[in-house]
Amino acid sequence: MTKNESDTIIIGLVSISDRAYDGTYADQGIPALSEWLGLAVKSPFELQVRLVPDEKDRIEKTLIELTDEARCSLILTTGGTGPARRDVTPEATLAVATKTMPGFAEQMRNISLNFVPTALLSRQVAVIREIPGHAALIMNLPGRPQAIRQTLEGVRDANGELRVPGIFTAVPYCIDLIGGPYISTNEAVSRAWRPSSKQA
């Protein structure tokens, strides 16, 4: 057991949508994320949930609050990553970052291209926000529940065998490297990859 393996990881879920925020329709992003994490993550975790409009300042303040005050080690956003004028989630995410993690964003688009050619329009980013004594991995995910699952879990063939790994495969080790709690996963949903010397 590593020193952090029994710790509870705090995960922030941020749904970004004008229409969900004003009640035009029910938010679908947070329920989809919550359900998937419940299936995939075996370690104890606590969710911090936020619903905000497509406003850059509001998104920035939410990401800072979740990292600096709520002490989230992982923050997943959903929505606001396209080319429309109100889509400002990537800009807000980059504004609070201390490091960028382009590999996650590249893999998200790689996965999505297996399903829709419009994945090329996605501007999703992944970053790390570091403050004294704490850090968080922040990742922008798609808005649709099915696309959220596909991005996290990866591409499977007709027999259910994993063909393209989902981005969550690399998340637990990234959290290790930034000093967060050890995350173990349900391998039938998402296998966490770590070097053999770092496995519990």
Image (spheres, helix red, strand yellow):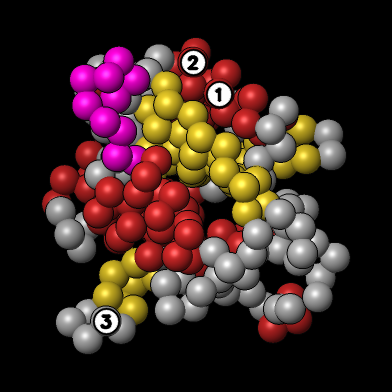
Residue 70 lies in the magenta-colored region: no
Q: Which residue is mark 1?
A: 62
Identify the disc placed on residue 58.
2
Q: CA distance from mark 2 to mark 1?
A: 6 Å
For the N terminus, the quadrant is: bottom right
- Disc 3 is placed on an element classified as loop
Type of residue at label 3? Answer: Gly
Identify the disc placed on residue 160.
3
Residue situated furthest left in the rendering: 117
Where does the image place residue 45, in percent across and percent down from the top left? 62, 54
Q: Which residue does the image show at 42% across and 72% down from the upper left?
A: 189
Where does the image place residue 33, in percent across and percent down from the top left? 41, 49
Where does the image place residue 16, in percent across and percent down from the top left? 37, 28
User: Image height check: is 83 above or below 196?
Assistant: above
Per the rendered image, the range of residues in magenta is 20-29
- Name the quadrant containing residue 21: top left
Is there any visible trace of residue 97 in the rendered image?
A: yes
Q: Nearer the viewer, residue 46 or 178?
A: 46
Q: CA distance from mark 1 to mark 3?
A: 37 Å
Q: Residues within 10 Å of mark 1 (few under 14, many from 20)?
A: some
Q: CA distance from mark 2 to mark 3?
A: 40 Å
- Disc 1 is placed on an element classified as helix
Type of residue at label 1? Answer: Thr
Q: Residues within 10 Å of mark 3 (few under 14, many from 20)?
A: few
User: Image height check: is 95 above or below 100?
Assistant: above
Q: Residues within 10 Å of mark 2 (few under 14, many from 20)?
A: some
For the C terminus, the quadrant is: bottom right
Q: Which secondary structure class fits the magenta region best?
A: loop
Disc 2 + disc 1, Cβ < 8 Å: yes
Q: Which residue does the image show at 35% across and 49% down from the upper left?
A: 32
Which label's residue is closer to the chain start, 1 or 3?
1
Where does the image place residue 111, in percent across and percent down from the top left? 30, 60
